[in-house]
Image (cartoon, coloured by chain):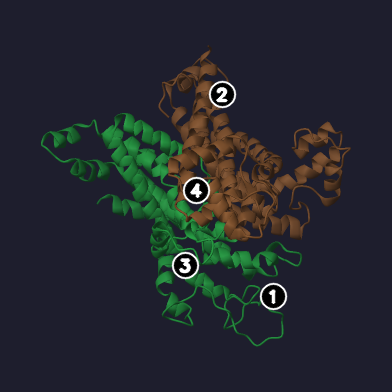
Chain colours: A green, B brown
Amino acid sequence: MKSLPRFFSRIQNLLAVAIIVLYIFVAIAAPRLAPPQDPENPSPFRVASVATTTSRHIPLPPAPDLPLGTTPGRLDVFYTLVWGTRSALRFGLTVALTTACVGIAIGAVSAYIGGPVNRLTLRITDTFLTFPVIAGAALFRLVLYPVDQQVSMTPIQSLLSSLGMEPVMLTLILFSWMPYARMVNAEIAKLKQVAYVQAARSVGAGHLRLILRHLLPNAISPAVVLVGRDIGGMVILQAAFTFIGIGGGSPWGYLLAVGRDWIIGPSASLLKYWWVYLPVTLALIFFGIGWNLLADGLNSALNPHRSHQRLW
Amino acid sequence: MPPTLKFVIRRLLAIPLTLLVITIVLYGIVMLAPIEARVSLYEPRGGKSRNPEALRQHIIKEYGLNDPYPIQYARWAFRLLQGDWGWSPLLRTDVLEALVTRTPATVELTLYSVLLLVPLGLASGVVAGWRPGRPADHGFRLIAFVATSIPPFILGLMLLGIFYVGLQWFPPGRIDIADSFVVTSPSFNTITGLLTIDGLLNGRLDITLNAFRHLALPAITLSLAHWATLGRVTRAAIIEERTKEYITAARGRGLPRQTVVWRHALRNAMIPGLNSTALSAASLIMGVFVVEIVFGFPGVSELATLSWVYTPDAAAAMGFAIYSVLLVLPLMFVFDVIQGIVDPRIREGIAER
């Protein structure tokens, strides 16, 4: 593990790790930082109860017991900031890892089989690349939620809802596996010809063993980098979807949606009502930056020959 | 047949194939829903029935919704080809008609964003990559880093907050209300549907300028992240190209540096960038939709927003999904063809991309 000290010798990698550790810390310490009303089943939102005569619709400025004020409708910004971290990490990790597994499995198996099967798989992969994720969300809502309550759920629907899959999550997984499949596919197609794989095959290694033991470990590093980048990217997409009203359940995105009129509405002022948007915005941006920098550092550590392609 | 034409035709033939696969997948997704949800895809023209249950049974029988998937799919796909994309009860119009009338706004926004981001992306990548480590390179990397770090919807919000609410320079929407009456009046000939061009064709420069004022912020928001990505890829490619022997040879023969950089090196270095832009065409179109919604730009995405505000409007959601692929494909096609024109190896199908 000579690469570990080298990884930490770069200041941006240290910064990336520091940012991510901070988010993880906030996520773990959420019940301490912002005690929920119902510790068993914490909601990511809390309505601040303050004795004041101002209208409910006017955001309250920061005060000692409300460190970052409230949005219109009295949602506690600090509270959602803290609990949103937990939700963001969970969402990002789930979606990115599931997507990666799906993509890697498809790419690896199809490259291993090779020939016309692989060509067909690659064609279908390219087809999926033409589908904008946003268009899937509305359709999936149709599939996941029964039109009215009397209608019983199909087996698939009950399976998805028991897994806690909501439409945006499912859409993101179903329509972002393609880069993983393409990457792993290209690597394995190259590796298949290399002597050590041929040697393993000639001593009788099985298909599964060849793929898992000999091919994947050497083909997976570009995918690892992409996972890092996707964790941030998926959370930002989720927040964007929640903000524009498709759902997705991002507490941060919801906060921005609630505060929207005070950011760009008729009586808005970016300077006067900064707490409505700035904390959440920064949390989102730094979440993205942290994972991007980490992915970048991993890239130069795992694929040194491509280091000139790094972001920073 | 000239190879370029052959290449273009081959790329064109891939389009129906893609649509086939996408529609098979989409209808497959709908098949997972209970039959009651599928019925709303076949909502009859005109709206509410007094007896919804009878209507539902009628639709199930009429369209054979209990048939096996392939038969249902084939029937549905045939209706799509005939232009019958269903009826949206929320919009109270045909879905296809609603999509088509909103297309020019989306196309206009996409067009200007691409025209902004591709030349700028290539140029800044070349300038930064030709002399890596110089101030221009550091400057580019810093700006590109910031540009990719800010999510587009937040950038859009901030730009609106500053330039619309604060400074009142650039308004949201597609055109000022006063001008919108001019545009919809009978004396104004709608030729292309693109307001910037129609304004010029009708001799109304003020309309063109007004449309540009409304386009500026969304186009910038949309371009920024993609510009940075394109610039980065081009920069990496130029760094690889500039030490190659043909560059040294060209310089050695005494060609001016500008010629070598912009004619020889760029020609090879633009391929990876164009390829990555082509592959991210779907995310560009998705960005268009997000930006449209944030800026209240009345494009195709209106169908989507409407279909998820209230109860799911199946026909609108489905129409939107298919139509968005129809918007991505031409964009991809253009980038593919440019690649084929620039690089004969791609055109001849020798280079694996």
Toward the top, the furthest residue is B1
The verdict on a common chain for dots 2 and 3 is: no
* Snapshot quadrant of residue B12: top right
The amino acid marked with disc number 4 is: Leu
Q: Position of residue B264 (x, y in %)?
A: 53, 22
Distance from Cα at disc 2 to Cα at disc 3:
51 Å
Distance from Cα at disc 2 to Cα at disc 4:
67 Å
Q: Position of residue B336 (x, y in %)?
A: 53, 29
Toward the bottom, the furthest residue is A51
Q: Chain of mark 3?
A: A
Nearest to the observer: residue A91 or residue A126:
A126
The amino acid marked with disc number 1 is: His
Q: Label 3: which residue?
A: A85
Asked whether the beta carbons under mark 2 and mark 3 sit within 8 Å of each other, the answer is: no
Asked whether the beta carbons under mark 2 and mark 1 sit within 8 Å of each other, the answer is: no
Q: Position of residue A87 (x, y in %)?
A: 46, 66
Q: Nearer the viewer, mark 2 or mark 1?
A: 1
Q: Chain of mark 2?
A: B
Left or right: where B150 falls relative to A12 = right
Nearest to the observer: residue A232 or residue A130:
A130
Depicted A98 relative to depicted B14: above or below: below
Distance from Cα at disc 3 to Cα at disc 1:
25 Å
Q: Label 1: which residue?
A: A57
Q: Which mark is residue B65?
A: 4
The verdict on a common chain for dots 4 and 3 is: no
